[in-house]
Image: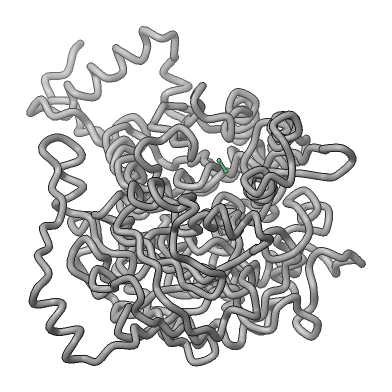
Amino acid sequence: MSSSKPPASPSNDGFAKGLTQYGDRGFSLFLRKAFIKGAGYSDTVLDKPVIGITSTGSAYNPCHGNMPQLLEAVQRGIMLAGGLPMPFPTISLHESFSAPTSMYLRNLMSIDTEEMLRAAPMDAVVLIGGCDKTVPAQLMGAASANLPAIQLITGSMLTGSHRSERVGACTDCRRYWARFRAQDIGQEEIDEVNNQLVASVGTCSVMGTASTMACIAEALGMTMPGGASPPAVTADRMRIAEATGAQAVHLARQRLGIDQILTDKALENAMRVLLAIGGSTNGIVHLTAIAGRLGYEIDLDALDRMGRDTPVLLDLKPSGDHYMEDFHHAGGMATLLRELKPLLHLDALTVTGRTLGEEIEAAGPGFRQDVIRSLADPIYPQGGIAVLRGNLAPGGAIIKQSAANPALMEHEGRAVVFEDAADLAARIDDPDLDVNAEDILVLKNIGPKGATMPEAGALPLPLKLARAGVKDMVRISDGRMSGTAFGTVVLHVTPEAAVGGPLALVRNGDRIRLSVKERALQLLISDEELKARAAQQKITPPTGERGYRKLYMQSVTQADKGVDFDFLRATEQRGKLPRT
Ligand code: FES
């Protein structure tokens, strides 16, 4: 006999989460199940914990070229742990296939990730990312969506060999290109090098932004232990993928949300690690954006203080000599975190449900290796990144001191100014350019609004100086630099020139003083002169005519706010970090 009672309202788990609204939840679930059954699923399977997997494979993204193998391993882990894997696509970003810049698109990927995590039913999600902007975009999106989440890194590429010299993207790309520009090597050799720099799929093999974000993700407690370092094509990487899938099911069962992992302590641990690995300067921008999604501001001066007692321990290019696969063979993050123990919050929770301290203990005692130094014998005595202030950067600027030339870190010189990237391209190789090795190269209008913040801050040395053997000069801009680059390069000058920051007021021939010791960046003109120039200056910040560009130009924040969109940051403020 049929009952006249209406069906009970569906629970809020699994496939009943986030139902499409038809005004009748029971009908919405009925319809959803009918459609998914069209793909051959049974009721038994649909009752399992649902684990979403962001699939970011793309023919345009060789850094994610192992996505099919990763997906297979993650799904195996999920199913063996009793869950239902549901891979779905999101935007994928590769540095070399993202015009005008990948930074312009990072926030779009974070919105895509956040909204798909909200729209599709899942009890937990595996975020698969690797290339520079993908991991921050996924962590930003997942932090805002606030559900159980675990990060899987695609892994680094293998190194290649050029005439018996070990090479890898992309510190060696820059080094060889500089030699080619200086006519030290010819066309034939640069073509040969081009075949060897990227020896397999995977992310850049040095401590660039991708490797930095992989280490940060593990330090945040967002990956399985040891998840940062296995190269993309190794069995270790696939085992991590399988374990990640299994752990995602446990996260779903325990309802361990990302807000319990991405805490103030986890963010401070990540900052320590960024400083100790000689990490990419982009890491600060991304960590600031992730923290902003959780209601935290990054206090750049406090970060600088943290850097003064956080030495660089990792001997990886561009600050050192090794590559990511060497870091992995040296024990990866467990070896680094063990050394950093006195400086970390060991009680920070990780996705395993255990604390960071417990995971360090579980990794064992360590062994002899020559990639990760001890606190007593660092590769560089302070953190890799220093924060500069002065009348040229009232909102701050940064320099990667561990990859800079010590002889130029206390320097005063004459400004040679380029108004924007086009001006730089037009004149930098002009034999008549009035420039010498002691000058300071200033590039304006490559900030977040000026040019969507390209990695153009390590501007090329003028050809005539490069050919004369000059290897480094002080360079200043409101742009970014690749984590794989090196040199005495001041970045992220805030506020940027395009919104009327003092950088816009620098003129050819002005004198500028850089003192990394005093953390000072000073335009050596009087306050009156600076004010008079500002009064004369007419600034019209760029606007986008339509579409995403319009949204970007209306909403993008400066570097000290993570270049996130203002409306994506958390509405509730929880204070400044680091508190140490
Ligand atoms: Fe993808 Fe370097 S281009 S990590």
Describe residue 143's horizontal placement relative to residue 460 as left or right.
left
Give the quadrant of ligand 1. top right
Asked whether the viewer can see residue 255, the reply is no
- Say which quarter of the image contains residue 388: bottom left
Q: How is the image coloured?
A: one colour
Identify the residue at horizontal 33%, vertical 46% (top origin): 422
- Residue 200 image offset from top left, x and y in percent: 71, 31
The structure residue drawn at horizontal position 65% and vertical position 26%, both measured from the top left corner, is: 69
The quarter of the displayed image where residue 195 is located: top right
Q: Which sits in the foreground, 22 or 329?
A: 329
- List x then y, in percent, for residue 379: 75, 75
Please report the residue visible at 20 percent of the width from the left and 38 percent of the height from the top: 548
Quarter of the image containing the N terminus? top left
Q: Position of residue 486 (x, y in %)?
A: 61, 62
Count of residue discs: 0
* Rendering quarter of residue 199: top right
